[in-house]
Amino acid sequence: MDGSAGHEPGPITLELLADLQAGLLDDAAAAALRQRIRTDPDAAEKLAALDRVRRDLAGLGTDDASAPHVPAEVTARVGAALQAAPPHRPPREPAHSVRRAPRWQVAGLAAGVGAAVLGSVLGGVMLTREPAPTRPAGPTAESITVSRPLGGLPLSDPQIGALLSRSPDYGPLADPERRASCLSGLGYSAATAILGAQRVDMHGRPAVLMVLPADTPKTVLVLVVEPGCNSAHTGLLANTLVTRP
Amino acid sequence: MGSCWGIDRTDAELLTAHVAGDRYAFEELFYRHHRQLHRLAQITSRNPEDAADALQDAMLSAHRSAPSFRHDSAVSSWLYRIVVNACLDRLRRNKTHPTTELEDDACHVGDPAPRVDTAVVVERALMRLPVEQRAAVVAVDMQGYSVAETARILGIAEGTVKSRCSRARAKLAEALEYFNAGAAAAAERLTE
């Protein structure tokens, strides 16, 4: 049945071919069977069919367009569990580096900017800023991905706005390939429009500040990265949404 | 300057926003992919209840572990992998359940409708296999895990992984009528 030397080989069944494909035959039996398949078109067709099964299984794993409808109660249940899960917060930084914005700024923001923007606010931290009701603030102020103490953006809102009408100064990220690698590490495509950029100083360390489009016309995304930002290590220092001045 | 106002955020942007503290971004990511995620859970689970449980566990796990995602694959691939792993893990923990062999005869899935998505046809055929065989081919053929990795994830011997893959693929090739003799055999069965 397995075609070992000295025995009359059995018929080439689909099951035998599937065993060959799955690596269940020893080397000698596999070699003998492959030799027979070369001169047996039916067997070759069956093996091709098995290969097609494997390809179609792989395709099924990525064909999300054809995925069937999900029962509403399942979706609702998972959605509710995700809503109840605590949002990410970084470890609390030493007291000198974080201060919540006053409540009136939060109220002004909610009224002025709308729930959609609040829903998509990325964290930012400010210290000693002039009143800026357009700056996202409040409970998410300390939510930031960075792992080092943060003293706020090194540019004010008007300064960031001014960047939009100047040529970008990418500093160490002037090379387009390096910039593309940095964007990729941050989760953006290399083709992402950068609206403005400037070299900045972040608590005594050189950094690059970039302004990207956000998801509403009135806001922009401000990222500050280390000069060595690349796709493996972005060195993200700040990540905040700012309302366009 | 591009004008990107009003365009949906990409998966990567949603995940970044989630890690930065956005309360709604991960949920949006889940809704965007929920049909395929649920499909993978169904295929890799013993029953719909297990699938729903595994899907929820997987999504909560992804929600928690998002900061460690290095963007070295597509976000969707990462989510699919987490769901499949959650299902395979559940099967490993519950493998003392009796295996139920589904009947082997039965509707060959040649669909009378002229154009049905290949993926849907394959899915239907797959769902007729016992979950142990489905899990093996999901791991090896769909997720690309090696036999050794699959054996470890499922808590079974490598030889068992291979034989389950072999049986599953043979049954699928026949049910899907991917070769003439298979189609003939199917036609015979239908007329009996």
Image (tube, rainbow, N blue to C red):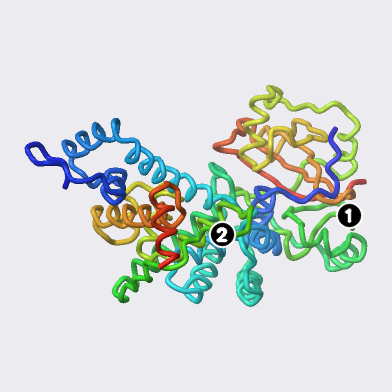
Label 2 or label 1, whichever lies nearer to me, is 2
Between the C-alphas of marks 2 and 1, the distance is: 63 Å
Asked if residue B9 lies left or right of residue A108, the reply is left
Q: Chain of mark 1?
A: A
Look at the image and tell me whether residue B21 can be seen: no
Residue A101 visible: yes
Towards the viewer: B158 or B185: B185
Q: Is residue B16 above or below residue B88?
A: above
Q: In the image, what residue type sits under mark 1? A: Ala
Helix, strand or loop for disc 1 = loop
Residue situated in front as seen by the camera: B105 or A244: B105
For the residue marked with disc 2, what is the amino acid? Asp
Chain identifier of the residue bearing label 2 in the image: B
On the picture, is B184 further left or further right than A209?
Answer: left
Q: Residue furthest left?
A: A6
Taking the spot 61% from the left edge, 39% from the top edge, the residue there is A185
| Residue on which the image places disc 2 | B111
| Residue B157 on image: x %, y % | 24, 57
Q: Where in the figure is residue B110, as x and y percent of width and height?
A: 52, 58
Which residue lies at the image location 30% right of the left edge and 76% below the top edge?
B98
Q: Which residue is mark 1?
A: A132
The residue closer to the viewer here, B190 or B153, is B190
For the residue labelled by badge 2, is the local secondary structure a helix, a strand or a loop? loop
Q: Which residue is painted at 91% across and 32% down in the image? A: A165
Image height of B172 relative to A34, above or below: below
